[in-house]
């Protein structure tokens, strides 16, 4: 009996892994067509739904990015959505809607209380009633979108005839920890490799939570978002597939932020996994027409749980090898393909990090790629906790609620500047061996946190950032010089977000501190970096 269960489980695992990897192999051998430059014959009106719950200043940053879009402002309708119990964000959104915006139409919708669960899908459905655009899109308040996003979306929907398109998402703050590193690799693989392979093989293409755009007519035809589903985006993508609507991928990257703490990651992932379970149950209860569609949608719902299945498969295989269970030949015929598929997923996961960071200068990138591949099973173990919480909430608790993910806009901070400005490349060319996010012990015995610390022979370099709402003060520059003195740094680079005060700038220049201001980043980075004065001599 036990051997039959082991055999059946490995067969299920083989099917799930094969379904996941087949599109990737198929796409690898499919000739790639060059993507033409989008040439629009007209500019359709785009209604952008922007749900914001407890987002604060993130909202202003996001709207600034929308105003800078390479698209006619009079063809953009921005609809900010807030909840009635979120007083601060509602007040901010109301002020923003009343401010003058050149060409841009800004509306503010406060979500009304209904019998539906509170959450993003309910908010989107209510805002959709106010949308007048031919195309309806969704962005999150913490998103940093590509300025060409709207033009690319309009081209795909109006010129190429897609009913909906999904953009590429990038969890850009991998420098914040081990889980953030894996999160970026996970998204790098999913959005840059896996989703395109699903499109190429005509598999269902689930939407992500943001940067998806729809032909309004098609969205309304399907009844928009399911207010009772915690992954309304994933479920909507399957409904588009079941309805034979044309879904594509727009090659435009939106940068996001992954949670900084494990508990925040767990809450977010629990919501996602529970939403996939809700979708699976909904599909089983009301199957789409045709066996092919039913099988595809069913397996697509299982794919997010493959890490859990693989962990259980590894545990079952190890147990079988160290016990005297008599296993049939079929078991051994399946265990080896499963083993190589798991190994392949580790490599694909690591490659996802490479793809996501291909345009960034990152210290010790090769080591981070190795960590992604070698510790993926440990990352899967974290999925266990989320799966168990999701099962408890769905089967035992049965109450639908939205676990909010907090955002601190880390993906737009100093590390993004370092990687995208050419600074790290410049330092490497200067012969520095660099470490990112580390602590350095000074002569006083105190440990100082560094954004970047570099060594070149006897010369040491420190890079730190200071952020302020308006200007970084003189006192902050003074503190930085004291840290440099304590660790005996010969060269210092200060990243000021957004800029230094006049007095602080003068003092930094006197001390020989190189300054990068986020407001004027290109000017400061493109100039030749001088050799800094020795701070000790300045004391």
Image: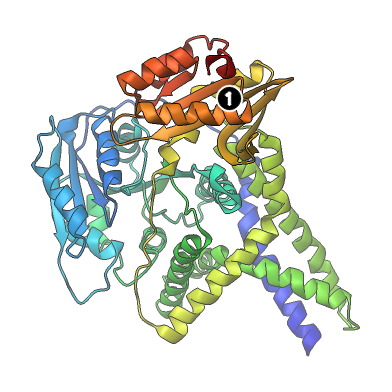
Is 501 rendered above or below residue 84? Answer: above
Q: State which quadrant residue 521 falls in.
A: top left
Is 444 rendered above or below residue 37? Answer: below
Direction from residue 452 to residue 394 in the image, left or right:
left
Is 127 rendered above or below residue 148? Answer: below
Outermost residue toward the right? 324
Q: Nearer the viewer, residue 520 or 288?
A: 520
Q: Residues within 10 Å of mark 1 (few under 14, many from 20)?
A: many
Q: Nearer the viewer, residue 199 or 507?
A: 507
Identify the secondary structure beneath mark 1. helix
Position of the N terminus by quadrant? bottom right
Q: Nearer the viewer, residue 457 or 156?
A: 457
The image shows residue 439 at horizontal and vertical percentages of 62, 40
Mark 1, residue position: 424
The image shows residue 197 at horizontal and vertical percentages of 56, 47
Q: Nearer the viewer, residue 473 or 91?
A: 473
Residue at the (50%, 78%) spot, across then down: 391
Q: State which quadrant residue 121 falls in.
A: bottom left
Q: How many circles with numbers are drawn on the protein?
A: 1
Residue at the (25%, 27%) spot, across then down: 41
């Amino acid at each position: 009996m036990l051997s039959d269960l082991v055999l059946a489980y490995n067969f299920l695992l083989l099917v799930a892994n094969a379904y996941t990897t087949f599109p990737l192999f198929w796409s690898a051998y499919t000739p790639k067509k060059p993507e033409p430059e989008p040439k629009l014959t007209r500019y359709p009106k785009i209604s952008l739904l922007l749900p914001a719950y407890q987002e604060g200043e993130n909202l202003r940053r996001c709207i600034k990015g929308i105003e800078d879009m390479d698209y006619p402002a009079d063809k953009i309708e921005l609809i900010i959505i807030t909840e009635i119990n979120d007083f601060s964000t509602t007040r901010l959104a109301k002020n923003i809607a009343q401010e003058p915006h050149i060409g841009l139409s800004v509306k503010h919708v406060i979500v009304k209380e209904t019998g539906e669960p509170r959450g993003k899908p309910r908010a989107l459905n209510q805002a959709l009633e106010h949308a007048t655009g031919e195309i309806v899109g969704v962005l999150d308040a913490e998103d940093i979108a590509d300025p060409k996003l709207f033009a690319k979306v309009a081209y795909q929907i109006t010129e190429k005839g897609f009913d909906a398109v999904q953009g590429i998402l990038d969890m850009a703050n991998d420098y914040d920890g081990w889980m953030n590193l894996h999160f970026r690799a996970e998204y790098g693989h999913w959005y840059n490799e896996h989703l395109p392979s699903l499109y190429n093989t005509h598999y269902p293409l689930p939407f992500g939570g943001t940067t998806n755009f729809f032909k309004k007519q098609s969205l309304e035809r399907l009844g928009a978002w399911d207010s009772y589903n915690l992954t309304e985006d994933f479920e909507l993508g399957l409904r588009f597939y079941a309805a034979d609507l044309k879904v594509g991928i727009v090659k435009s990257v939106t940068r996001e932020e992954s949670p900084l703490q494990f508990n925040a990651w767990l809450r977010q992932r629990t919501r996602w996994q529970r939403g996939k379970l809700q979708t699976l149950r909904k599909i089983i209860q009301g199957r789409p027409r045709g066996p092919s569609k039913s099988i595809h949608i069913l397996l697509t719902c299982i794919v997010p749980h493959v890490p859990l299945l693989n962990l259980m498969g590894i545990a079952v295989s190890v147990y079988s090898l160290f016990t005297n269970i008599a296993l049939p030949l079929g078991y051994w015929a399946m265990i080896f393909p499963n083993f190589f598929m798991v190994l392949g997923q580790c490599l694909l996961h690591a490659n996802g990090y490479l793809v996501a960071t291909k345009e960034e200068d990152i210290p010790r990138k090769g080591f981070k790629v190795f960590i992604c591949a070698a510790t993926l099973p440990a990352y899967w173990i974290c999925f266990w906790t989320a799966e168990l919480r999701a099962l408890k909430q769905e089967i035992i608790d049965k109450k639908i609620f939205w676990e909010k993910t907090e955002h601190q806009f880390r993906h737009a901070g100093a590390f993004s500047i370092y990687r995208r400005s050419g600074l790290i490349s410049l330092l490497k060319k200067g012969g520095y061996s660099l470490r990112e996010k580390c602590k350095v012990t000074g002569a006083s015995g105190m440990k100082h946190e560094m954004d970047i610390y570099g060594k070149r022979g006897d010369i040491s370099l420190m890079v730190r950032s200071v952020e302020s709402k308006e200007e970084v003060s003189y006192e902050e520059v003074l503190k930085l010089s004291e840290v440099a003195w304590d660790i005996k740094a010969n060269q210092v680079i200060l990243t000021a977000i957004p800029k230094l005060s006049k007095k602080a700038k003068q003092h930094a220049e006197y001390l020989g501190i190189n300054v990068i201001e986020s407001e004027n980043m290109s000017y400061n980075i493109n100039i030749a970096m001088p050799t800094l004065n020795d701070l000790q001599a300045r004391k």
